[in-house]
Amino acid sequence: MSVGTRGIIILAALVVIAAGIKAAQALMVPFLLSVFVATIASTPLLWLERHRVPKVFAIIVVISTLMAALLAVGALFTQSLGQFTELLPAYQQRLETLFQALLDWVVAQGLPRPADYTEVFDPGTALQLAGNTLRGLGGVLSNGFLILLTVIFVLAEASTIRPKLVAALQNPNRDLPHFERFATTLNRYMAIKASTSLLTGVLLGGFLAVIGVDFPFLWGLLAFFLNFVPAIGSIIAAVPPVLLALMQGDGGLGLALVTGIGFLAVNVLIGNFIEPRFLGAGLGLSALVVLLSIIFWGWMLGPVGMLLAVPLTVTLKIALDAGESTRRLGLLLGPARAAGQAQEEQTGAQSHEAV
């Protein structure tokens, strides 16, 4: 079989798989979230097992904690989202009024007034998009029982994966380290990313509550999820609360500036100092790959797909990095500095062998 024919077959298979995933979106979203939650929950589960807690009791503790957190978050989320949805038209009207005042000021300065600025920029779109995204998350939370049930089975099966791989692989001594490296790296990435995202959401939610921005819990939750999206996620998460601070009756430009500065400070602290220290450059993605993954998974799975886009793509990158023959493909997904470090390490290794 020629290389061209093989490429066409592989491309056709990928198209069929993508069409199947999109057709099964209602089923795939809860399943992917279950795997995502189970990967994060495996860290405390393994910690409990290392401290001689029986596996059944460890799973009960982890699931009970997840259930309590889900119920608490779901109750607060439902209440806040209902209030925000009810006030959304008033906020949009207020934003339209402020934008009209800005255009009047521009005309007063002698500049031409746009004929219909809404065709180019609708100032209420950001709040509407935030509302749609939050409603999408609310729809996911409604499947909480199915997600928790799937997480229980995934965690229960986690300890049996190694014996199954040993029995299934033709050469387990050669191939098993690749699977172990993949699982260890993925678990580490998810645990650290979830921890830093939780820290981001708590800090920003508390900050917004202190300065008096409406619905701080919603914006903290949105910051938590969007922190999984590098670079642009923090910008998107900051837009709705900044606009809301601008529109509040007791707010204005000063409160909006304080809100923006707070978001900038927290994201710079976590994104530039804390996360790189623990994750390193090797697990990063290039900006183009991040953008394409958000577009692709958003089209495939909707708003939740946009939030899971980067974790899914990082999972693919970790899988490629785990194999010797596919490591170069993993480098293509990463940032330039990671490729440069890999090249320096390879050059150093070759120099050491030459010596």
Image (tube, helix red, strand yellow):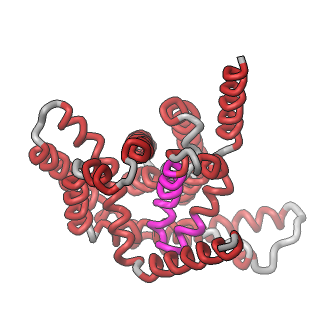
Residue closest to the far top: 355
Q: Is 326 inside the magenta-drawn segment?
A: no
Judge left or right: residue 351 versus residue 317: right
Pick the quarter of the image with the C terminus. Answer: top right
Out of 48 and 75, give the one closest to the viewer: 48
Question: Can residue 202 be seen at all in this image of the molecule?
Answer: no
Q: Is residue 298 above or below residue 116?
A: above
Q: Of helix, strand and loop, which mostly describes the magenta segment?
A: helix
Measuring from the top left, give residue 337's x and y in whole percent: 69, 37
The stretch of residues the image draws in magenta is: 294-319
The residue at the point 58 percent across, 62 percent down is: 293
Q: Nearer the viewer, residue 15 or 101?
A: 15
Measuring from the top left, give residue 187's x and y in whole percent: 38, 44
Q: Quadrant of residue 304?
A: bottom left
Residue at screen point 47% across, 66% down: 305
- Residue 314 picture location, percent across and down: 52, 51
Specify the quadrant that holds the N terminus: bottom right
Residue 207 or 59: which is nearer the viewer? 59
Say if the magenta span includes residue 302: yes
Q: Is residue 39 left or right of residue 126?
A: left
Residue in the image at 39% along x and 49% along y: 171
Give 218 or 293, whichever is nearer the viewer. 293
Residue extending farthest to the right is 110
Up the image or down, 135 lies above or below 270; here it is: below
Q: Is residue 327 above or below residue 272?
A: below
**In x, y percent, where is residue 71?**
21, 58
Q: On the image, which quarter does residue 259 sit in?
A: top right
Q: Is residue 237 left or right of residue 80?
A: right
